[in-house]
Amino acid sequence: MDGRARGSYTARLMSRKTIIVPKGQRAKTRDGSPWIFSNEIRMDPAAKALAPGTVVNVRGEDGRAFGTGYFNPKSLIAVRLLASDCDAAIDADFFAQRLGRARALRQSVYDRPFYRLCHAEGDGLPGLVIDRFDDTLAVQTGTAGMERQIEAISAGLDRLLAPKTVILRNDAPSRALEGLDAYVRTLKGEGRRIAVEENGVRYLADLTEGQKTGWYYDQRDNRAFIAKLAKGKAVLDAYSYTGGFGILAAKAGAKEVVCLDSSAPALALAEESARANGVKITPVKADVFEELERLKTAAERFDIVLADPPPFVKSKKDLEPGAKAYRKLARLAAEVTAPGGMMMVASCSHNIPPERFAQECAQGLLRAGRRAALIHQAGAGPDHPVHPMLPESAYLKVLVYALD
Ligand code: SAH
């Protein structure tokens, strides 16, 4: 850092505001959590006046340092901590260092540069998600605090990885909770169609038009598990998106793979991707519930039925209807599973606890009149690390049953 930069940094620090946690306001059990709720801090006029996303110091009334974080007076999660010390510099160096640690973790697990590089709190960077596709990155900022750091993040990434292309996928609906608008923008480079290498397959993904960041790395290990069962089997990949499960199953020797989804562009990409891998899938564009009913009535059965739906429990208030939808999905999936077949049901709703989800699936099996054994319970892979104080952020739940 040259003298001028250091000078301006010091000036910034001098003006850094402090958020106070009054005595007894934050339960001891919340020690170590990177979140500080609005009812845990002194929300005085000075705090309220801070712009959403301002970097702040957080201290107890007694002077104890909670650390450096960013503040949003409009959010229930008022502060998300970035560092455990106060006055920490939040700049390109900070991001390069944190992301360097995140990359080292991935490099210890994966041979190839295709993974979720940053998983928000799990990587010490609340509100920041980055998926890496070799030299192309899809970046999502989910909070006002991270939105304000886009330049520093981009500079940090340049220092660390020098990516060719960086696409901002800032169109997640959850951004509205932080008062942010939705947009997709290319920050650097060009191109949107890329290849994803995973489990020995080269898939196609569309980073600007596709859903979320364009690819779901969270199911990588579960796709590999299903592929091991797939040889010679008829597979129904419901909610297939671009064929993550189906194409790998076909490569593993499935005798038939039907990819079922309501999105025509996703199915078109799945077909193209399958062809490029020298395998065939049958795309079916339909609503999953309707199509499962139709298959059931038509007495069409599959040896392996996969159901990886969008979140049915989008918020806590949707728990009951969402739980019911999972039960119905499990019932219908079981009803079209051939005798001796396998069925996988997944939930990516962090608002339904794992036990409740398992209970609903069990009820669905019961209602279908199928006896089953749970043979595999999993979540997302190691490129989706979870902060130990935020176990609920482990959103993905995957259950695989062997049916009689
Ligand atoms: N299994 C996929 C990811 C699924 S994402 C993978 O491994 O990559 C959820 C998918 O469900 C999306 O592709 C979306 O288009 C599809 N979808 C959402 N609602 C649907 C419905 N009612 N019927 C069929 N597909 C639906």
Image: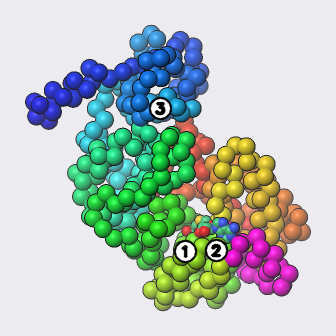
Residue 284 at x, y percent in the picture:
65, 82
Q: CA distance from mark 2 to mark 1?
A: 8 Å
Q: Which residue is mark 1?
A: 266
Q: Residue at x 70, y 64 (%)?
A: 345
Q: CA distance from mark 2 to mark 3?
A: 38 Å
Marks 2 and 1 in Cβ contact (< 8 Å): yes
Q: Earlier in the sequence, mark 2 or mark 1?
A: 2
Circle 2: residue type = Asp
Which quadrant holds the N terminus? top left
Q: Earlier in the sequence, mark 2 or mark 3?
A: 3
Ligand 1 within 8 Å of disc 1? The answer is yes
**Please, is residue 262 above or below residue 274 in the view?**
above
Question: Horizontally, is 266 left or right of 110 in the view?
Answer: right
**Please, is residue 88 above or below residue 373 in the view?**
above
Q: Which residue is mark 2?
A: 261
**Please, is residue 114 above or below residue 70 in the view?**
below
Circle 1: residue type = Ala
Quadrant location of residue 326?
bottom right
